[in-house]
Image (tube, helix red, strand yellow):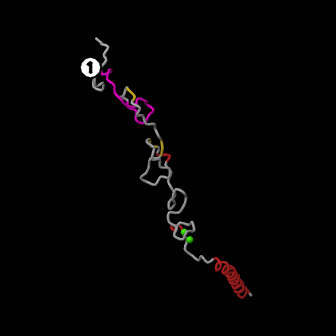
C-alpha cells in the first residue's frame, strides 16, 4: 500500500520507508552538463557547462585551454621545432630571426662576397680559356 509520504528531518535519508523514490538526491540534473549526476533528482544549481578544448599541458600546446574540461585532442596545435607558438625562434643568439639551430656557417661579409663574385667568374673564364688553348694545341 502506497502512502502519501512527506518525510521530515533529513530528506537525504529516507528512514521511514523502503520507497527510495521519495528520497531527494541533490546534484546537477541536466544531462548536457559536464557534472551531470544521473542519481540526482533535485537540481542544486552546481551544474558546470561542458568546455571542449585542448587540455594538453604536458607538451607546449599553443592553444591549451585551462578552462577546458572535455578533451578534444584533435584541436591541439603545437609549435614548429625550434620555434615558439608566435613563430619566433626559441634560440637566436645573434637576433637575426634565424634560429641558432638553422644558422648556416660561412662568410657573412657581404662586401667581400660582392667583390669575390666577379673574380670567381673571371677565374672560371680563365680556366675555360686554358682548356680551349690546350685542346687547340693538341688538335693543331
Ligand atoms: Ca645569423
Ligand atoms: Ca640567429
Q: Quadrant of residue 134?
A: bottom right
Residue 69: x and y in percent read: 43, 42
Reply above or below: 94 against 130. above
> Nearest the camera: 104 or 65?
65
Secondary structure predominantly adopted by residues drawn in magenta: loop
Residue 3 x/y as whole percent? 30, 13
Q: Residue furthest left?
A: 15
In the image, residue 22 lies in the stretch drawn in magenta: yes
Q: Quadrant of the N terminus?
A: top left
Which residue is identified by label 1?
18
Report the magenta residues as a range. Answer: 18-37
**Closer-to-camera residue (22/101):** 22
Residue at the extreme front: 9
Side of 17 relative to 110 (left or right): left
Label 1 secondary element: loop
Point out residue 44 in the picture as x, y percentages from the top left corner: 39, 30
Amino acid at each position: 500500500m502506497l502512502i502519501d509520504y512527506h518525510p521530515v528531518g533529513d530528506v537525504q535519508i529516507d528512514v521511514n520507508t523502503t520507497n527510495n523514490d521519495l528520497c531527494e538526491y541533490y546534484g546537477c540534473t541536466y544531462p548536457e552538463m559536464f557534472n551531470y549526476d544521473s542519481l540526482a533528482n533535485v537540481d542544486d544549481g552546481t551544474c558546470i557547462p561542458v568546455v571542449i578544448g585542448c587540455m594538453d599541458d604536458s607538451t607546449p600546446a599553443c592553444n591549451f585551454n585551462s578552462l577546458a574540461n572535455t578533451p578534444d585532442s584533435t584541436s591541439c596545435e603545437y609549435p614548429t621545432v625550434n620555434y615558439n607558438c608566435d613563430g619566433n625562434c626559441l634560440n637566436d643568439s645573434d637576433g637575426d630571426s634565424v634560429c641558432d639551430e638553422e644558422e648556416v656557417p660561412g662568410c657573412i661579409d657581404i662586401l667581400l662576397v660582392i667583390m669575390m663574385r666577379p673574380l670567381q667568374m673571371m677565374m672560371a673564364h680563365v680556366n675555360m680559356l686554358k682548356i680551349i688553348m690546350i685542346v687547340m694545341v693538341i688538335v693543331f
